[in-house]
Image (cartoon, rainbow, N blue to C red):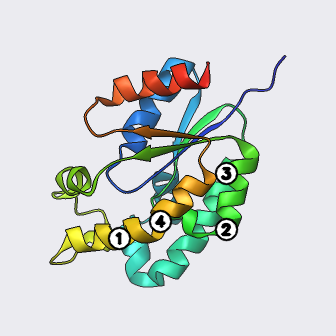
């Protein structure tokens, strides 16, 4: 039997990784994981609490461990956290263990999609747009570096984007 392939979704906050990932997994009959949800399940606390108590560095260590564990599975769709690509080790692991899909979106869409979400510690500031712009400048080259496929998510439903990914990957 052929080995099942993994699909790893990367991209900024608000790109639709979790929502699109659920659609992809459902359509391909694969198991879906969200690295942030897995961190919360393992720590027994929400992401904001982990950030408050352990700082971003502590959170990134937990994230790297979760991604290491999850990428050892076969036949999964994994939605990663927006900052997971900051680690060269994580980027290498994603590249080696599956197909990496970069879900690209604009800053305007990110602002619209995240403005009422209080579960994003990096955006709990007066000017979230400025934070998103800084993160994009830092992270977009890393997303591009590791991506096998880039798909823009701005003006399409999650279901349509999932179908585009399936078609472009030849599943």
- The residue where tag 3 is placed is 94
Q: Helix or strand or loop: what does disc 2 sit on? A: helix
Instruction: Confirm or deny contact between disc 1 and disc 2 (CB under 8 A).
Output: no
Residue 22 is situated, as x and y percent measured from the top left of the image, at 44, 32
Which residue is at a point 45% across and 59% down the rendered structure image? Answer: 82
Q: Quadrant of the C terminus?
A: top right
- The residue where tag 4 is placed is 139
19 and 102: which one is in front?
Answer: 102
Which mark sits nearer the N-terminus, 4 or 2?
Answer: 2
Which mark sits nearer the N-terminus, 4 or 3?
Answer: 3
- Residue 42 appearing in the image: no
Q: CA distance from mark 1 to mark 2?
A: 24 Å
- The residue where tag 1 is placed is 48
Which residue is at a point 44% across and 21% down the rendered structure image? Answer: 163
- The residue where tag 2 is placed is 88
Q: CA distance from mark 4 to mark 3?
A: 15 Å
């Amino acid at each position: 039997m052929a080995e099942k392939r993994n699909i790893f979704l990367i991209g900024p906050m608000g790109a639709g990784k979790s929502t699109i990932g659920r659609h992809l997994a459902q359509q391909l009959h694969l198991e879906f994981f969200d690295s942030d949800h897995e961190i919360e399940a393992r720590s027994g606390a929400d992401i904001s609490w982990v950030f408050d108590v352990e700082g971003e560095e502590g959170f990134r260590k937990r994230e790297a461990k979760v991604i290491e564990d999850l990428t050892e599975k076969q036949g999964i769709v994994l939605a990663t956290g927006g900052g997971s690509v900051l680690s060269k080790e994580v980027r290498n692991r994603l590249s080696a263990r599956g197909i990496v899909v970069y879900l690209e979106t604009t800053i305007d869409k990110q602002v619209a999609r995240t403005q009422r979400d209080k579960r994003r510690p990096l955006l709990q500031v007066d000017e979230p747009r400025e934070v998103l712009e800084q993160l994009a400048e830092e992270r977009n080259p890393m997303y591009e570096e590791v991506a096998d496929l880039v798909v823009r998510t701005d003006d399409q439903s999650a279901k349509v984007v999932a179908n585009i990914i399936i078609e472009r990957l030849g599943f």
